[in-house]
Amino acid sequence: MPGARPGGVGVAVVAGAVVGGRRRPPRRVAVGDGRDSRRGSCARTHVRSPLFRAVTSGIIGRDGNGAAWPGRVGRRRAARGHGREELTVRHSDGNTIVLIGAGEVGVAYAYAIVNQGLCDRLVIIDIDERRAWGHVQDLRHAVPWAGHQVTVTTGTYDDCADATLVCICAGSAQKPGETRLDLVDRNVAIFRDIVSRVTATGFDGVYLVATNPVDILSYATWRFSGLPANQVIGSGTILDTARFRSALGEYFDVAPTSVHAYVVGEHGDTELPVLSAGTAAGIPLRTRLAQSPTGEQDVTEIFERTRDAAYEIIDAKGSTSFGIGTGLARITRAVLQNEDVVLPVSALLDGEYGQTDMYIGTPAVINRHGVRQVVELDLDDTERERFTRSAETLRRVMDAAGLGEAAGE
């Protein structure tokens, strides 16, 4: 709504009272977007009926400063305060996310953002403006049942100026039979244009890159933007790790959330699982696998299915979207909520694993500044050799695409 102070949804309660033998008009409640009414709020006003009082008193408590607290805790906290005149419910700190590219992955990401309520404002930019408009309308209709107030709009690159995070999902899609690295020439050119437009707005937030080949394009984004490397994150192997954990959970008959194992390296054909540092239900993977005569062969087959899953899904439905969309939302939450959580992403290496000046899939600590620290896993000899081969594959593609130290100049 126009003229607002950022900060989320607002509910203002105006008290009625008996003054000089006369009763003031019934209490009214303005339900709006948290914007100052003196600046032209578009809030709707409703009579505060006994039914409304009964419902809200059970849902929202108020403290002396007008802050809202839900449920029983709210009523206890409200009892400690005295102010009853005004109540404001704030959703978050006014974070804006700009999504560039409203294809299958972008829309899955947007849907996850809305469902999880990760920002106050989500702006969608797409070369097909009508398609972007249609997605915005559809997402808006999901907001009432999402449980979170998120304003979803179409926009332009100017919206990046004050954004907290820009997620790039635009680019040429992977076709059946193509590898992710086959996309590099087409998408580097697209990214050069996109990043230059975002940079022109003065954007100084965090980039989240999803377009394939994601390791190459994350590096390109860093070079083209001129931002510190920590402010550019690629989705990396977050989806591969999720697939691997899901399959291992099924194999060991435990929840995937009880499996802690990473896939690292290129998000593609040369990626590798790190079994030496993995656990399932707290037990080292190597120990569990040794308990079965076919354990090593089984886990090899599980990983091969993980690595090739994208090809099978693309062949069946044309694209992958839900897994990566949710993975992107997980990275976004880590940034916006300053979590300092370890996630498998594409990050710049500076000596880790014996590699420098390249983005590649690795665990990293993620917070509001982006990548706080790369976590170098203690790989065994076989894993380190495979990681080196994966890095060399990416390096050859980067060199062929003309990326490197001079690309950002």
Image: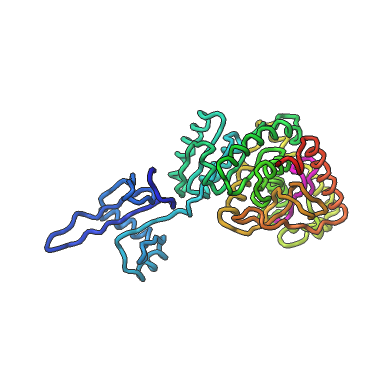
Q: Position of residue 279 (x, y in %)?
A: 75, 59
Q: Considering only vertical position in the picture, is 111 above or below 36?
A: above
The residue positioned farthest toward the left in the image shown: 21
Q: Considering only vertical position in the picture, is 167 above or below 74?
A: above
The residue positioned farthest toward the bottom in the image shown: 80
Magenta range = 259-272
Q: Residue at x 79, y 37 (%)?
A: 397
Is residue 366 shown left or right of residue 67? right
**Does residue 246 appear in this view?**
no
Q: Considering only vertical position in the picture, is 79 above or below 130?
A: below
Q: Position of residue 44 (x, y in %)?
A: 31, 46
Q: Residue at x 48, y 48 (%)?
A: 120
Is residue 63 magenta-colored? no
Query: Viewer-proximal residue, 326 or 374?
Result: 374
Q: Position of residue 283 (x, y in %)?
A: 75, 62
Quadrant of residue 196 within the rendered picture: top right
Q: Residue at x 53, y 46 (%)?
A: 163
Q: Position of residue 368 (x, y in %)?
A: 59, 55
Is residue 58 shown left or right of residue 228? left
**Does residue 24 appear in this view?**
yes
Query: Viewer-proximal residue, 255 or 131?
Result: 131
Q: Quadrant of the N terminus?
A: top left
